[in-house]
Amino acid sequence: MRFRRRNLEDPAKVTKILHPPSLDGIDHKILRLLRADGRMSNADLAAAIGLSASACLRRLRQLETSGIIRGYTAIIEDPTPHSRTVVIVQITLERQTEDAFNRFEAAVRQCPEVCECYLMTGASDYQLRVEARDPADYERIHKEQLSRMPGVSRIQSAFAIRAVVRGTSPAWVED
């Protein structure tokens, strides 16, 4: 279950994320505390790092505006172990042109079952993480959505058995 989709259509946002501004020790403390508790109030966050509430809020807004903090989410543990099927999908396009990439990316943003999509190097052009109710539901997604996306020449799918590591924090955030 997702509450909000991240939208990276804005090239300025993508540039900010790929080239984050320099972070100081206070920024790293804010990020570390929010990784542990994303619902921490601004007052508690400010007290934990030794800033006034207004200075802390100003820093937090700057991290959000720069794209370092892209959003907030809830990580939900599914009560039933097999309620969602995770499928890792590799997609190869017919042509590797800017127009082909743009058309495919616009289409994949419209597919609600695609949780993540990455432009890749190597044998395939894109790697997707798709969530389906079960294999039959994935067959529907494959047939009705993925195979109809513009420029798709090959789709390879692998079903996940179980999650071993699931994380939300980037490696570049210092502890």
Image: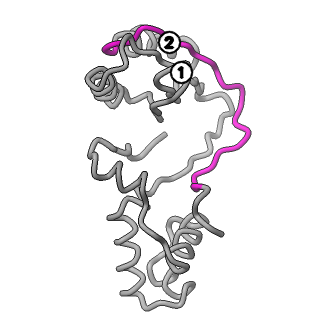
| Left or right: 89 in relation to 70 | right
The residue indicated by pointer 1 is 89
Tell me, for residue 155, which label it has, or none: 2
Counting residues from the start of the chain, the first of labels 1 and 2 encountered is 1
Q: Quadrant of residue 36?
A: bottom right
- Marks 2 and 1: in contact by CB < 8 Å? yes
Q: In terms of secondary structure, where does tag 2 sit?
A: strand
What secondary structure predominates along the stretch shown in magenta? Answer: loop
Front residue of 20 and 114:
20
Question: In percent of the image, x 40 and y 77: which residue is there?
Answer: 59
Q: Is residue 150 magenta?
A: yes
Q: Amino acid at mark 1?
A: Val
Q: Residues within 10 Å of mark 1 (few under 14, many from 20)?
A: many
Q: In terms of secondary structure, where does tag 1 sit?
A: strand
Q: Amino acid at mark 2?
A: Ile
Q: Residues within 10 Å of mark 2 (few under 14, many from 20)?
A: some
Q: In the rendered image of this protein, does residue 12 appear above or below residue 27?
A: above
Q: How many marks?
A: 2
The location of residue 174, given as percent across then percent down, is 62, 67
| Left or right: 80 in relation to 18 | right
Q: What residue range appears in magenta?
A: 149-170
Question: In percent of the image, x 42 and y 8: which residue is there?
Answer: 153
| Left or right: 85 in relation to 5 | right
Q: Is residue 79 magenta?
A: no
Q: Quadrant of residue 83?
A: top right
The location of residue 14, given as percent across then percent down, is 35, 48
The location of residue 79, given as percent across then percent down, is 64, 40
> Distance of mark 1 from mark 2, alpha carbons?
7 Å
Question: In percent of the image, x 38 and y 46: which residue is there?
Answer: 4
The location of residue 163, given as percent across then percent down, is 69, 36
Front residue of 14 and 158:
14
